[in-house]
Amino acid sequence: MKSILILTDRLDNRGNPTNGMKVGKALRKLGQRVSYGDHTVKAEKLKGFDLILAFGTLLYPDRVKHVSRIAKEKRNGTIFALWYFDACNPAFKHSRYKCKAMREAIPHLDWLIMTDHSYAWENYAKNFLHLMQGVDPDDFDLTPSGPEGRKYDVIFTGGFKGAFQEREAMLAEIKKRFSLRVYGRNSDRRVYGASFFKAHQRARVAFVPPPPSAVARNYWSNRIYLAAATGTPCVVGYVEGLDKHYTNGKDVMFFDNANIACESIRFLLDNPDRRKEIGLTARAWTLRDHTYTARAKTLMGAIFA
């Protein structure tokens, strides 16, 4: 058993438990001793831990200064790690401030863990682990809808402006052929947690686009795991390496251009039994092997190898 201090906000700005809280819950399931704090944690509260695991909220402009302080005040022998759950690539205009904070933080970290692998942060970190976000099975402990509850063809959640504007052309092509519901930063709707699950129960197919062409490295969105966990079959933009997580034609349908995406959507709409099979296969696989607990196990195995 290891003693772990999680540094995170408890709730995000929508009132949902943060990734840090969910990782802490997963670590407890693995039998670890977990405590919580935030960026204001005092020196006396940093002692006695094998691992201090911080999250992205520590990189906010008014908080990043605490990274160096925590590194100085922690006990010798305590591992100080940061797990970052969002895009952090200078090619994305909206994330450049995050990159600046990351560069400031990295020299003080023993480990950097990133869900985003679109930029070579491993070249700057002492130790690096690429580890995707997991899902919390409790968020998906609901029964997927039958065909009668599926009111429209395709659902998409995410952004489609700025660095992600290439998605807009794909969405326009899908909208020409199918009924489409869009949720995300560039629409008037947002869905998270149970509402994310429920929104996917009203669609027959989930569309998960590829990363922007500006990304030269293998990268895919954490959203694929969330969408797959709903039981709604996913049509997914293929990225090298993604086939180690999902199998084309078995639990997802991969595509590499808008026409193939539309062909895959049409196939799923025309074959309801196959559509159900693919969706439920992905759901079972995701809730078994792509959970926060599975990710936490990988993290502990890497750090304490």
Image: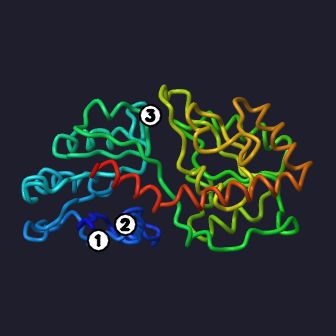
Left or right of residue 153: residue 184: left
Confirm or deny contact between disc 1 and disc 2 (CB under 8 A): yes
Tell me what residue is drawn at x 28 percent, y 51 percent: 82
User: In terms of image quadrants, where is residue 66?
Assistant: bottom left
Q: Type of residue at label 1?
A: Val
Report x, y in % for residue 8. Answer: 30, 64
Q: Which is nearer the N-term, disc 2 or disc 3?
A: 2
Left or right of residue 132: residue 279: right
How far is mark 1 from mark 2, CA to CA? 7 Å
Q: Which residue is mark 2?
A: 27
Q: Which residue is mark 3?
A: 118
Q: Which residue is mark 1?
A: 34
Q: Type of residue at label 3?
A: Ser
Left or right of residue 196: residue 43: left
Tell me what residue is drawn at x 60 percent, y 49 percent: 224
Q: Type of residue at label 2?
A: Leu
Tell me what residue is drawn at x 90 percent, y 50 percent: 271
Tell me the number on the disc at residue 196. none
